[in-house]
Amino acid sequence: MQSEAERVQDIALMSKANIPIEFIRSEHEQPGITTVHGKVLECPTIDFSNQDDEKILNQIVEASRNWGMYQIVNHDIPNEAISKLQAVGKAFFELPPEEKEVYAKPPDSKSVEGYGTKLQKELEGKKGWVDHLFHRVWPPSAINYQFWPKNPPSYREANEEYVKHLHKVVDKLFKVLSLGLGLEGQELKKAAGGDDMVYLLKINYYPPCPRPDLALGVVAHTDMSALTILVPNDVQGLQACRDGQWYDVRYIPNALVIHIGDQMEIMSNGKYKSVLHRSTVNKEKTRLSWPVFIEPPQDRVVGPLPQLVKEDNPPKYKAKKFGDYCYCKLNKIPQ
C-alpha cells in the first residue's frame, strides 16, 4: 500500500505556493512554456443524430486519419447517465483517505486495476499531478468487483447504466471505421476481440495545483487501447499536439471525446492515427475525467489486418499480444 503522503490529493493539501520538485517538468514539457496560449483547438465535432450515414462516415474517417481525436454530440447517451457517472466518481475521491485505500492497487499486481497514483515508468523519475481509479466495466466475465467502490452506494448502478448506453456508440464507431478501411462492417471489431473486447474505466482526479504552469496531470502519450471514449468535467485540461505544438481542446458539455488508440492505428496499418495528448491542471479547481479504454483481451494477438496488407502496403507494425504490447509500453521497452 502506498503511504498516504504519496497520494497527490494529500500533497495538494500541503502545497501552498510551491510543489515538490518531482512534479516540476523540464522546460520542453512545462505547459506554461509549451502551450499555444489564446488559441483553442477546434478538433472535429461530429453529430451522431445526423441521418446522413455517408456524411458521418466521411467525417469520422477523415478525423481518425488526420486528427486521431474528435468529439461526438447527440450520441444518445442520456445526459443524466453521464452526470450520475460523474457524481459517483467524484464522491469516491472525496471519501476519507482510509476508505479509498481499501481499493488500492495491490503492489505486486499484474493488472492496472485499483486506486493508485503511479502508472508507468517515467523517464527522469517525474510524477504526474493526478490520482486514479481503474476498473473493468465490461464484459461481465472480466469484471473484478473488489475494485468497484461500495461507497457511494449508487456507484455500481451508475457505472452499469453508463456502460449499457456506451455499447451502441462503440459498435457504431467500430462499424464506421471498418467501412472506412474498405472492409465489411464487423471486421475491425472482430480483429479487436469481438464480444470479448474489454472496457476499462479510469477515473483521473487532478487536484488544484499551485503551479499549473510547471506541472502536468498526465504526461504526453498515446493511448494503448483501440479506442478511448472520454467524458471530462467542466475544468479545462485536455491538450492535443498538432504540428508539434500543444493546444487546449475545447470543452463541449456532454460531448464524448474520442481518441484513436495504438491498437486501432496498428490494425489499420497506419491509416488511422493515434493521438498524442496530455492533461494540464488548474490552480483553483479540481479536474476529473472518465476515459473508457476499449481494448482487446490481454492474450489477443493484434497486428495490421491481413486484408489491408499488400505488396505496395507492407505491414508497418509487428503483430503481438495486447498484454505484451502494454507491458513494453508502460515499461518504456521498444515495441
Image (cartoon, rainbow, N blue to C red):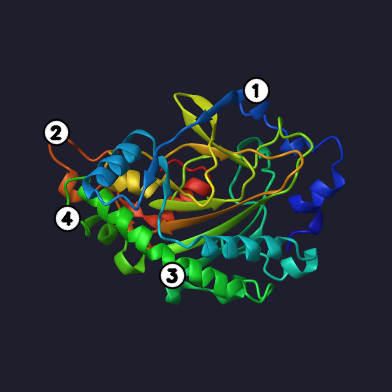
| First reached walking from the N terminus: tag 2 or tag 4 | 4
Under mark 3, the amino acid is: Lys
Q: Which residue is mark 4?
A: 184
Under mark 1, the amino acid is: Ile
- 10 Å crowding of disc 1: few (<14), some (14-19), many (20+): few
| First reached walking from the N terminus: tag 3 or tag 1 | 1
Under mark 4, the amino acid is: Glu
- 10 Å crowding of disc 4: few (<14), some (14-19), many (20+): few
Q: Give the answer, above or below, for where 27 lies relative to 258.
A: above
**Residue 5, disc:** none
Residue toward you, 61 or 222 = 61
Q: CA distance from mark 4 to mark 1?
A: 46 Å
Q: State the residue at coordinates (52%, 60%).
A: 79
Q: Is residue 3 left or right of residue 170?
A: right
Proximity of marks 4 and 3: CB atoms separated by less than 8 Å: no
Q: Which residue is mark 3?
A: 164
**Residue 312, disc:** 2
Under mark 2, the amino acid is: Asp
Q: State the residue at coordinates (19%, 38%).
A: 314
Which structural element holds mark 4? loop
Which structural element holds mark 3? helix
Q: CA distance from mark 3 to mark 1?
A: 42 Å
